[in-house]
Structure formats: C-alpha cells, structure tokens
Image: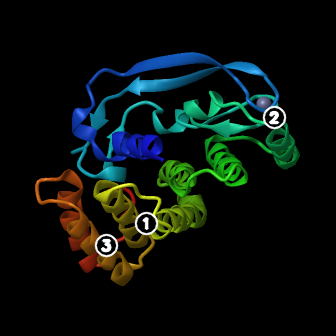
Amino acid sequence: MKTKHSLIIAFFLVASTFCEAHTFYWEKVKCPVDGRKFMFTGTGSMTITGDGYADLMIATSGSHYGTLIQSCPKCHYSGFLADFRINLNRKNKKLLQKHLSKYDSTNIDVVVKCQIAAEVKQILASDYVEIASCYLVGSYLLRYHSQKQDLRKEFQLKTMKYYKASYYSFQCSDLADSALACYMIAEMLRRTSRYEEAMLYYDRVLIYSTPDNRVNLLAIKQKKMALEKDDNNKI
Ligand SMILES: [Zn+2]
C-alpha cells in the first residue's frame, strides 16, 4: 500500500519536485497471466504547466497519465509497471483469464485499461488504495471529455469508495497516510458536488497533518472551494 500511496503522492501532490525535461522510460515486461512479453513505455518526467498547485490540478505536457497503466496486448491484463513484475499462482491466473476474456472484443483505450486494472486488483484482493489508484487515474484522463462526464463521476465515486474502505478498515499505516486518504476522499466528494461531506474530510486532513505539510495547505485551499460550492474538475 505504501508503494502505491507514494505513487499517488508523486503524481498528484508533489508537483514542485518535478523537473522540466520530458523524458521516457521503457522496460520489457512479461504478462503474469499468459507470459506475453511487450515493452512497457512511460513518461519518466515531464513539464508542469499551469501553477502546478494541487493534486489533480497538475497539468502536464505529453501523455504522462495515459501511460501510467498499460495492458498486455494478448489477454488485456492491465496495471502499473509494478503489476507486471508480480508472479501469480495457477488459481489466480485462471480467475483472471476467465474475467479478462470478456474484453476480447472491446476497444482497449486508456480509460478501459484503468477499469480493467481496478478489476484485476479486486480479483487479487489488493489493498483498497491500490484499487482506488486505478479509478483515480481513469477519472483524471476523463476530465476534459465533455461526453463522458457521467463516467468521470462514476470513476471518482469509486475512487472515493475505495479510499474510504482503506481509511475505515485501518489500512492507512500512519497519520500521513490517513491525511492523504481523507484528502482524496474530500476531493472526490467536492468534484462530484457533495460539498457538506467533503468539508468533514478536509477537516480530518487538518487533524492528521501539521500546518507546514503540503496536504494541510491543499486542504485549506480546497475546502474554500467546497464552501463556495465549486466542483471544478478542470483546474
Ligand atoms: Zn497477458
């Protein structure tokens, strides 16, 4: 869980640490379901555009978010790079093969990859925040698709659901983890126009973090937006 939480922090919260160059990485990976080998290509660093202030506000050049989750070209198994470095037992391989076969005639775009990755993690009983991470990336990819805002909200509500599951089942390992989980819950609530409940979770962020912490500053700023009933997703 810590790994994936760190990933979320890296990509959504700590924009100021990113460098200006836009670089790529690639790694030959093997699908843990059927052994198919392919190149996993992603963005190593990127240029931050806009003010780079808060979580999903970070606007980047290139296709950084669209390359975070990728799929096996043969069976559609999907996940982050780390998900292609795992070994699966025979039972889980069979379970996944059966589930993934329903995507055989589907156009696997970047959003579908996020959906599949989340389903894979549910089948493998991964930590809740890992499942949330897949829906979060999908919701981010959908923010400018005016025709798909219902799907964007569906992904955000699922992100919230799994962050809540993580928080209430005590999967958060320390105060910093709890602060991040509450911040993500609050943001998903604000972004889906659930302002009253959002403010409760921004307040919890303030309890779990100190004033000099970045997530504390973000919670204060975003809570003001919730007070003004601002559900802006495109910032
Ligand atoms: Zn595969």
The residue nearer to you, when weighing 45 against 93, is 93
- For image coordinates 38% across by 32% down, the residue present is 61
The residue carrying mark 1 has its beta carbon less than 8 Å from ligand 1: no
Query: Is the Cβ of the residue at disc 3 closer than 8 Å to that at disc 2?
Result: no
Q: Could you tell which of marks 3 and 2 lies nearer the N-terminus?
A: 2
The residue carrying mark 2 has its beta carbon less than 8 Å from ligand 1: yes
The residue nearer to you, when weighing 120 against 187, is 120
Q: Which residue is mark 1?
A: 188
- Residue 127, horizontal then vertical, whole percent: 56, 53
Q: Is residue 83 left or right of residue 169?
A: right
Q: Which residue is mark 3?
A: 230
Q: Quadrant of residue 182?
A: bottom left
Image quarter for ligand 1 = top right
Q: Quadrant of residue 106?
A: top right
Give the amino acid type for the residue marked by disc 2 in the picture.
Cys
Which mark's residue is nearer the viewer, 3 or 1?
Answer: 1
Could you tell me which quadrant the C terminus lies in? bottom left
